Image (cartoon, rainbow, N blue to C red):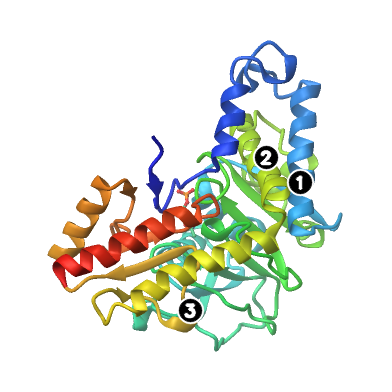
């Protein structure tokens, strides 16, 4: 039996995607072998990857002025690839620090020899909100942000429009959960394991005019232009991970009907859970400020850590799994990724009411 999966990452995947992958396991598309056993240069696999890119383009409304590539090394390798390609030694770049992942990206830029600066930070507020006042460096080559903060449960409700350089966003934990106006963006990326597929592939979309400015004295596997030039096949790409991500893109297009529909369902899920938290007379407390709340990662606490633990344990035995907060902050977190159904959220909210009756 499948559980109600609220894991923060790797997260829940659509049942239809898992079922199709299972059906195809022994004989993918009449090739007589699984997709993992096919050559990545076979016409079938090349066509599959092209189709994955086309589906992603359709979902995000990306024109030909955007390139789509698949990298490895997780979202975390992008923390280094971005400054290496676009800032270089001593190069200026601005960071908006909204939590653990943004802090890591900022530090990585320094390790790579670039000159990152904080255009804004909510660290003094325990990262419970998204800053909306920025001190941009006019010389910055890009402005970096994390659009959804998986650990603290905050999400950008809008994006800076007056940045002096293209925005670059880590969208890992909200990728394809809502339509995003990409007008001010130069690059967006997402590690697959939160919202689209198995860990091991990172989906990167970037404007070609930004890619054209990438530095060229960069090792091949760290160079964005080398991925673009070789259609992500300079070496063997993570074919399985791309394939599963592609099934999720198809699910989003065909079954869900696009990102507007996905966003509407995600909003209902988040409103249901935040409603339960806010209506609990303070028994459950949301940790993110209301104006910055994430629709993907809902972070909350009970009165005391013992109750947090008890809640997590009893929820688990009811088939509600993955409700522990990130190990760096504790508390509780329900991740409501695209594949988490409304029925799972309804079950959680019922459990919460019942738990409060017994422990409130
Ligand atoms: C999980 C996560 C990461 C780290 O991803 P890895 O693929 O493990 O490197 C980075 N950024 C955000 C926003 C995340 O949620």
Residue 260 vertical placement versus 47 (above, below): below
Q: Which residue lies at the image location 52% right of the left edge and 62% below the top edge?
A: 109
Image location of residue 165, percent across then percent down: 70, 75
Question: Relative to 290, is 138 on the left or the right?
Answer: right
Quadrant location, the N terminus = top left
Quarter of the view holding residue 285: bottom left
Q: Which residue is mark 2?
A: 246
Q: Are there few (<14), some (14-19), or many (20+) residues within 10 Å of tag 1?
A: some
Residue 292 disc label: 3
Q: Which residue lies at the image location 63% right of the left edge and 43% below the top edge?
A: 248
Q: Which residue lies at the image location 63% right of the left edge and 77% below the top edge?
A: 159
Q: How many marks?
A: 3
Q: Are there few (<14), some (14-19), or many (20+) residues within 10 Å of tag 2?
A: many
Q: Gap between marks 1 and 2, in whole Å?
A: 7 Å
Q: Gap between marks 3 and 2, in whole Å?
A: 30 Å
Q: Are there few (<14), some (14-19), or many (20+) residues within 10 Å of tag 3?
A: some
Q: Which residue is mark 1?
A: 55
Image location of residue 68, percent across then percent down: 74, 49
Quarter of the view holding residue 138: bottom right
Work out whether mark 3 precedes mark 2 in sequence or the reverse, and give the earlier one.
2
Image location of residue 235, percent across then percent down: 67, 30
Question: Relative to 293, is 303 on the left or the right?
Answer: left
């Amino acid at each position: 039996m499948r559980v109600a999966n609220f894991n923060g990452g790797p997260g829940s995947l659509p049942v239809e995607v898992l079922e199709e992958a299972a059906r195809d396991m022994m004989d993918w598309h009449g090739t007589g072998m699984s997709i993992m056993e096919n050559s990545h240069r076979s016409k079938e696999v090349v066509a599959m990857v092209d189709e994955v890119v086309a589906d992603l383009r359709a979902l995000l409304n990306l024109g030909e002025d955007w390139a789509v590539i698949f990298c490895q090394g997780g979202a975390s390798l992008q923390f280094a690839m971005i400054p290496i390609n676009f800032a270089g030694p001593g190069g200026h770049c601005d960071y908006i620090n909204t939590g653990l992942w943004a802090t890591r990206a900022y530090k990585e830029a320094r390790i790579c020899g670039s000159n990152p600066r904080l255009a804004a930070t909510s660290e003094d507020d325990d990262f419970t909100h998204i800053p909306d006042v920025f001190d941009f460096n006019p010389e910055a080559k890009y402005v970096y942000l994390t659009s959804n903060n998986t650990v603290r449960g905050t999400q950008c409700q809008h994006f800076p429009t007056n940045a002096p350089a293209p925005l670059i966003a880590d969208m890992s934990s909200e990728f394809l959960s809502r339509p995003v106006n990409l007008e001010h963006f130069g690059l967006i990326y997402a590690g697959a394991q939160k919202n689209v597929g198995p860990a091991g592939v990172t989906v990167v979309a970037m404007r070609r005019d930004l890619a054209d400015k990438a530095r060229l004295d960069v090792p091949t596997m760290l160079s964005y232009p080398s991925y673009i030039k070789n259609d992500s096949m300079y070496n063997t790409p993570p074919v399985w991970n791309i394939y599963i991500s592609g099934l999720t893109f198809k699910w989003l297009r065909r079954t869900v009907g696009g990102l507007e529909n996905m966003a509407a369902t995600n909003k209902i899920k988040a409103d249901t859970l935040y409603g339960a938290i806010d209506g609990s007379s303070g028994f459950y407390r949301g940790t993110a400020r209301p104006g910055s709340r994430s629709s993907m990662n809902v972070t909350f606490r009970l009165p005391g850590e013992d109750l947090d633990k008890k809640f997590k344990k009893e929820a688990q035995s009811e088939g509600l799994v993955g409700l522990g907060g990130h190990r760096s902050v504790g508390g509780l977190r329900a991740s409501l990724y695209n594949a988490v159904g409304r029925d799972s959220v309804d079950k959680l909210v019922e459990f919460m009411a019942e738990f409060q009756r017994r422990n409130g």
